[in-house]
Image (cartoon, helix red, strand yellow):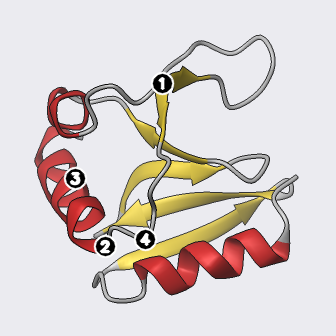
Amino acid sequence: MTTNDFFNFIQECFSPIENVTYRKMMGEYCIYYRGKLVGELCDNRLLLKRTPSSEILLAGAPLESPYPGSKQLLFSVADPENTEKIRNVFAKMYDEL
């Protein structure tokens, strides 16, 4: 489960980005940008959906599964404090989702 401390850290990192919301689900959190699901917090990891833009903008980011047995569909993002990069990724992903 994602801890409250990690969730609060991510919220603080993303606070400059408009239109980011969260929804708690079974101890984890879904992340929405302008109403579209862009990723999730799972076991204290920031995972974003794979889209053509996220694959380019997050080149080299490892693929990880949100839970055992799931498909590796999400990127693990190591630098959530890079607000401009995340804002750009979300904006590019938005049109692809």
| Residue 70 against residue 74 in the figure, above or below | above
Q: CA distance from mark 4 to mark 2?
A: 5 Å
| Residue 79 against residue 55 in the figure, above or below | below
Query: Callout 1, which amino acid?
Result: Pro
**Secondary structure under badge 3?**
helix
Kindly identify which residue carries mark 4: 81
Mark 2 vs mark 3: which is more N-terminal? Answer: 2
Residue 62's disc number: 1
**Secondary structure under badge 1?**
loop
Q: CA distance from mark 1 to mark 3?
A: 16 Å
**Secondary structure under badge 4?**
loop
Query: Callout 2, which amino acid?
Result: Thr
Question: Is residue 70 shown left or right of residue 27?
Answer: left
**Secondary structure under badge 2?**
helix
Kindly identify which residue carries mark 2: 83
Query: Callout 4, which amino acid?
Result: Glu
Which residue is depicted at the point 25% across and 28% down? 59
Q: CA distance from mark 4 to mark 1?
A: 18 Å
Can you give x and y, in whole percent of width and height, for residue 51 in the image?
Answer: 25, 30
Residues under numbered marks 4 and 1 in contact, where contact means CB atoms less than 8 Å apart? no
Dot 1 crowding, Cα within 10 Å, few <14, some 14–19, many 20+: few
Residues under numbered marks 4 and 2 in contact, where contact means CB atoms less than 8 Å apart? yes
Kindly identify which residue carries mark 3: 89
Can you give x and y, in whole percent of width and height, for residue 96 in the image?
Answer: 15, 39
